[in-house]
Image (spheres, rainbow, N blue to C red):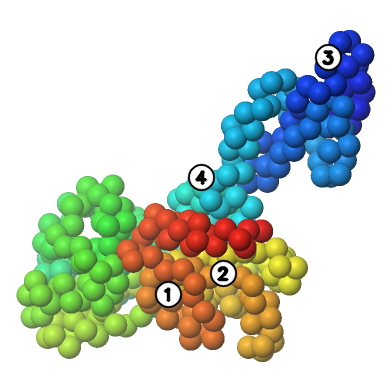
Amino acid sequence: GIKNLPIITKKLIDNGRDPQTPVAVVRWASTPQQHSVVGTLETIAEVVHQADIKPPALIIVGEVVRLRETIDWYEKRPLFGRHIVVTRTREQASELVALLEEHGADCLEYSTIHIEPVDDYQVFDRELARIDSYQWLLFTSLNAVTYFFKRLYDLGLDARSLGGPRIAAVGKTTGDELLKYGIRVDLIPEKFTGEGLAESLIAAGAGGSRVLIPRALKAREILPEMLAGAGAQVTVAPVYQNVPPQGRKEQLREQLAAAEIDLLTFTSSSTVTNFLTMVDAASPEELHRLLDKVTIAAIGPITAKTVAQSGLKVDIQPERYTIADMVDAIVEYYNNHQDSAG
């Protein structure tokens, strides 16, 4: 259609259509790359040429084009034209990507974390065998839930094995994930952080309890330290590990160097540290040069602190530490920065 547009418009005019009939051409309709132009039968071929519109594109002819507010609806979404990097694991990126794309963003998935089971389940298996001796079982992430139950099932067990301890989750999302396994949590803190969880547990009288925390092989120690400081007997049982993924490092550096990225999203401290490993800047000066015009969003204060420790500045941080609230904060930020559209 686009290649033959001059022929199409000429034939329409030759067959009696008014040369001033409105025409719209929409490239990549209903995608983050949507681009629409408007002209008349007489001018549209030149308009398309000047705008460098290439296939695939949709051609619309007639008075309906005057309803351009409808035709370019996608381009009016708040994140349209924004190129946003999603650094979550591929398994967990879908929710964030879907919400960002719903607002018109062009999402670039650079998974900075690959999740694997731990090599040695010795500690976990030992403590699971005496789970009834614990008063609390704590889940601090979606991955902890996933890999806890994976190992539980591999051992021929199920949720009936967890009748002894009370169960707490670091946040609503983790609590919702546990519900999928038939587990209703007893406690979710108001602040969705390790500190918030520790404070809520101590307030609930967990100071003298035995506490089991299935988690990543490497993780922040603040939760077990705070609980131990309050008199709890805490056992950490690794069930998964974060491994930096391989590949795409050069592509990421090229896009940063070419200023093709508007926003970086970080949903955990691990995504920050592994992203910096992928970028592999030779110096702090090179890192700042690559990210000079890139906006940074962090899901919460712990992640933001990790960003700050690398010498970078967080521009967006939601009040509630959830994916949905993070996206809302990103939309609000760009609604307030319309003049800097990409």
Residue 47 visible from this viewpoint:
yes
Q: Amino acid at mark 1?
A: Thr
Give the quadrant of residue 2.
Answer: top right
Name the quadrant of the N terminus. top right
Which circle, 4 or 1, is nearer the viewer? 4
Residue on which the image places disc 1: 303
Q: Secondary structure at mark 3?
A: loop
**In this picture, residue 135 sits left or right of residue 117:** left
Residue on which the image places disc 2: 295
Residue 129 visible from this viewpoint:
no
Nearer-the-camera pick, 17 or 261: 17
Marks 4 & 1, CB-CB < 8 Å contact = no
Q: Residue at x 88, y 37 (%)?
A: 46
Give the quadrant of residue 130.
Answer: bottom left
- Residue lying farthest to the top in this orientation: 15
Residue on which the image places disc 4: 102
Neighbour tally class for label 3: few under 14, some 14-19, many 20 plus, Cα within 10 Å: some
Residue 274 location (% of width, % of height): 55, 74
